[in-house]
Image (spheres, rainbow, N blue to C red):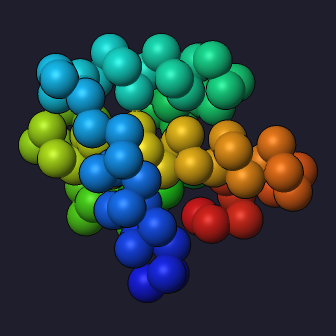
């Protein structure tokens, strides 16, 4: 898990955006990846493990960035390895 977090931190620095990540950005990315997020227990467990908070509307901008980056990372890994979000949850 530590290696995964370090990878995300590196990825965050490489893909920093001019604007902060919003809840809408996370929702749109999850929708694009066909990941259910609305009151979804797996998604809330996933975000809680990442940030300590399960609800996006209670997260800071930095925490939203972590979730957004993690979803992007998982998408890249899934493309390579056909893995799923449930393997980390």
Q: Is residue 85 above or below residue 37?
A: below
Q: Is residue 53 left or right of residue 89?
A: left
Quadrant showing the C terminus? bottom right
Q: Quadrant of residue 53?
A: bottom left
Residue at 69%, 45% in the rendered image: 76
The one of 9 and 66 positioned closer to us in this rendering: 9
Residue 56 place in picture, x, y as percent: 27, 36
Residue at 87%, 57% in the rendered image: 81
Q: Is there any visible trace of residue 67 in the rendered image?
A: no
Q: Is residue 34 left or right of residue 54?
A: right
Residue 4 place in picture, x, y as percent: 50, 72
Q: Residue furthest front?
A: 14
Residue at 57%, 49% in the rendered image: 73
Q: Is residue 64 above or below residue 63?
A: above
The one of 42 and 1 positioned closer to us in this rendering: 1
Q: How many marks?
A: 0
Residue 88 place in picture, x, y as percent: 62, 66
Residue 3 place in picture, x, y as percent: 49, 81
Q: Residue furthest right?
A: 82
The one of 62 and 88 positioned closer to us in this rendering: 62
Q: Quadrant of residue 61?
A: top left
Q: Residue furthest bottom?
A: 2
Q: Is there any visible trace of residue 79 in the rendered image?
A: yes
Residue at 17%, 23% in the rendered image: 18
Q: Is residue 49 above or below residue 77?
A: below
């Amino acid at each position: 898990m530590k290696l995964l977090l370090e990878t995300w931190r590196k990825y965050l620095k490489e893909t920093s955006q001019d604007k902060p990540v919003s809840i809408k950005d996370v929702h749109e990315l999850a929708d694009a990846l066909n990941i259910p997020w609305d009151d979804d227990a797996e998604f809330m467990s996933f975000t809680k493990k990442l940030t300590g908070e399960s609800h996006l509307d209670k997260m800071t901008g930095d925490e939203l960035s972590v979730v957004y980056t993690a979803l992007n990372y998982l998408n890249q890994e899934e493309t390579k390895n056909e893995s799923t979000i449930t393997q980390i949850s």
